Image (tube, rainbow, N blue to C red):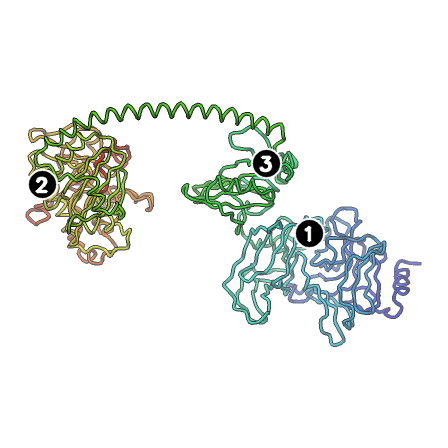
Amino acid sequence: MGPAVLFFLVLAAAAPLHLAAQTLNYSMAKPSTVWINNEFQRHGFSSRLRTIVTRSLGPETQARPDSELDVAAGFTCASRQSACNDFLFAVFIYMNVGFNLNNATTPQPQVIWSANQARPVTENATLEFTSDGNLVLCDDDGSHVWSTSSSGRSVAGMLITDIGNLVLFDQRNATVWQSFDHPTDTLVPGQSLVEGTRLTASTSAINMMNPNQFYITVLPDGLHAYAESTPPQLYYRLPWASIDKKGNDPITVTFMNESLTVSVRSDIYHQFSLPPAKSTRFMRLDSDGHLRVYEQSGISWPVEYDVMQIDYCAYPTVCGRYGICMGVQCTYPLENNSNSRHFKPVEERKPNLGSTPITPISCQEIQHHQLFTLTNISYFVKKPTVVNATSIDDCKQACLKNCSCKAVIFRHRNNSLGKCDWLTEVFSLQSIQPEAFGYSSSAYLKVQLSPTISASTSNKKRVLLVATFVAIATLVLFIIAVTLYRQRRRKYEDKNEEFYFDQFPGMPTRFSLEKLTECTRGFDKKLGEGGFGSVFEGKLGEERIAVKRLEGARQGKKEFLAEVETIGSIEHINLVSLIGFCAQKSERLLVYEYMSRGSLDRWIYYHHNNNPLDWCTRCRIILDIAKGLCYLHEECRRKIVHLDIKPQNILLDDNFNAKVADFGLCKLINRDQSKVVTVMRGTPGYLAPEWLTSRITEKVDVYSFGVVVMEIVSGRKNIDNSHAEEEVQLINLLREKEQNNQLIDLIDKHSNDMLSRQEEVIQMMKLAVWCLQNESTRRPSMSTVIKVLEGGMSVETFDVNSIMPVQDNLSTYLVPAQASILSGPR
């Protein structure tokens, strides 16, 4: 008796009323039929493929009409191993030519749906299409494995559609149950993933028996991919705009040959394009978390497209659990600056399989938990569980107090408050470069210490604590002794210095600390602050004042009052007036006239969204600065060199009249001196080349003035790292534009007024070039500058190459000497 006859008798005994359904290679079957998974039902020469219902793929699924592919429902091997002991009841695509499917070169059937992925069956398992319309799968021992739960619903038959949908239908050909409503890991063209359903990856590419930890689902705001944990960890999201649904109709994402289409009922809201199809294709969520489109090429199914298109290290298991992804390599965790090991590779020669804790974490020994620190490590989760902890210590403590926490990731920018991400399961970690990512991130992995190690650690901590206490006590006693000594010395000095107050005739008004506290209402309205103190608004009678409260002052009263005398003796309409001062105990305060418009930098750098200054206002400001410097250089009894001319030290009143401020770094020069030797002081970017020799004249202010003129004209900072590398240094850019006769490019683009008066603006730039000469003797005096600005003489023409390139001028990046305590923004 041949195999075909024997198979016929088995089916006849099981279902004598529906013999037509016993014949293979038909697309439809009737109820009251039983199929037995055995050798007699195999397809062709293959013992691994046993079809029940089958038909040719339709045009929606096949890109080529001449393809030799069929789609079928039946039994197939759950594994691609050589021996086949486990079977799935599945829908699969296979080649309908007579190849030997046991041969390794023959394409394996591509499973697109399976009923019993989590529980495969063996030889002689049965699939029964019951008389009441239920499809029931039982194993060889008779145990129930799976069913459609469709009994009692007037099922008339079962068929496989030409796009791979297994359907149970009633007498009116209406669908009672279909496999498309229960997707596994694959979508075929024309199949939809409905809101509330999932694609769940198989354990591996060669083993389809157990679900993986990856799944994809449709949510109202996008297609989300998760790694299964508690809670699930999101690693990919395909977002779309909000969809205004009517009623309870779900959102569906339909896989078409060349797109993913988002719709509700028949209304299409979004389409995401895929590469054009060349042949039959399907889309599968693979065991590594990738969502890939496969396409037939001959007898193989190569990957055509990776839908997610995210970084290699952004997949949860790219390096296994606790593995660290570095570029395209995997490693296991080693604590910073420590030789101790808390993790070991799952397999030494396969680092991509990840790591495992050497000592498993036990909630019964929570007192022995410790956090293992890894710096410059981030994590893939796109919507983490954020703990209410903004400091690293709070973040770590929150994890140590909860046994379900396996690790925390702390992210922050510029050492500010950060975010604490809580992990109940740890998948692959990612090594990062903070400067490339724009933030810093550290991982703290929970490890279990053995009691012996914990006791040893406790003893070390106890010894360290005692040593620390002794050191602190000694330090406190030393500080007390020094403080008592200084207090006694200060009392002695205060007596002498109180007498010294009376030695300065014509001093500015001296105020008490109580008076200035009252004038400023307890220093409550801060105008600004700098490295040496803060400036507060106050009111003295009806006059508004600015009170600078110096912080960290290290001068004695005698030196402080000597500088106050020098500044107080200066009086000019273009210099900020010092009204008074306070020197009471350790307090040092200066009282200035109030300048309502603040400093020049806020008006030319556009930090405060101010309207651009017109050309006439800019010219007047430049002239005011020149007049103030001319007075200091040429009209005082002794030359006063300011040494810190920059926009922050130019203040403006209501009418944009400019006044030079901040004389804390100034240097006095006798009229019979041509130069004076002093240590470098000032602000990088505004320092003249002769500072390298420490022999300076008032011409260093002229150089700084030239830099400020260029900033006013161009509306940008002298050194601005937000520009391209070749445009960071304004003075270098000036040399280049002058050489190429392109000075017009430097005009402030915010001001249409300036763009319409280009010739005047370019003449102002040429005045700046004159002031920026490398040799100080070739720079004009400030009185000459005033004549040029007032039209009394023309600008001398110089070769722009006589300006020293900024990178050759060491003053631009040498750190200046400690400035006087009077310096900083007024």
- 190 or 192, which is in the foreground? 192
Q: Earlier in the sequence, mark 1 or mark 3?
A: 1
Mark nearest the camera among 1 and 3 is 3
Disc sitting over residue 211 in the figure: 1
The amino acid sitting under disc 2 is Tyr
- 796 or 543, which is in the foreground? 543
Q: Determine which quarter of the picture holds residue 581.
A: top left
- Give x and y (percent) for residue 321: 61, 42
Disc 2 crowd rating (10 Å Cα; few below 14, some 14-19, many 20+) is many
The residue located at (24%, 38%) in the rendering is: 550
Q: Earlier in the sequence, mark 3 or mark 2?
A: 3
Query: Element at badge 3?
Result: strand
- 452 or 310, which is in the foreground? 452
Q: Quadrant of the C terminus?
A: top left
- Total marks shown come to 3
- CA gap, disc 3 to disc 2? 72 Å
The amino acid sitting under disc 1 is Pro
Q: Is residue 201 visible?
A: yes
Disc sitting over residue 631 in the figure: 2
Q: Say which residue label 3 marks.
A: 369
The amino acid sitting under disc 3 is His
Mark nearest the camera among 3 and 2 is 3
- 808 or 497, which is in the foreground? 497
Disc 1 crowd rating (10 Å Cα; few below 14, some 14-19, many 20+) is some
User: Do residues under tags 1 and 3 come within 8 Å of each other at their CB atoms?
Assistant: no
User: Do residues under tags 3 and 2 come within 8 Å of each other at their CB atoms?
Assistant: no
Is 634 left, or right, of 211 in this rendering? Answer: left
